[in-house]
Amino acid sequence: MYFTDRGIEELADRRGAEEVSLQWLAERLREFVDLNPEFETPVERLATWLARLDDEDDDE
């Protein structure tokens, strides 16, 4: 188990029944990076990965 799995499990347990928009998620990610600028690169990578999930042309 990765360390991040605990946070993901907590998110699923505490907020898993909620429905949110991608706009809401984008705003929360921006807030997080504003408060934690050292995590800008990982958040950017996660956001880009989520944005491109359906891209069949992107082999990364």
Image: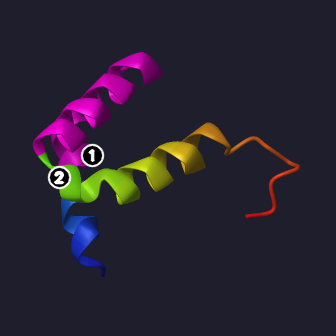
* 27 with respect to 35 (left or right): right
Question: How far is disc 1 from disc 2 in space, using C-alphas?
Answer: 5 Å
Q: Image quadrant of residue 54? A: top right
Tell me the element at label 2. Answer: helix
Residue type of the residue flagged with mark 1: Ala
Magenta span includes 5: no
Instruction: Residue 31: say if magenta.
Output: yes
Residue 52 drawn above or below residue 17: below
The residue segment tinted magenta is 8-35
On residue 12, the disc is 1
Let me know if residue 21 appears in the view. no
Give how far across and how far down residue 47 sits, in percent. Answer: 48, 43
Q: Residue at x 60, y 38 (%)?
A: 51
Above or below — where is 21 with respect to 60? above
Residue in the image at 88% along x and 50% along y: 57
Q: Residue 10 — which label?
A: 2
Q: Which residue is located at x 23 percent, y 42 percent?
A: 33
Q: Position of residue 59 (x, y in %)?
A: 81, 62
Q: Residue 21 is drawn in which quadrant? A: top left
Can you tell which mark lies on residue 34? Answer: none
The image position of residue 45, as x and y in percent, is: 48, 55
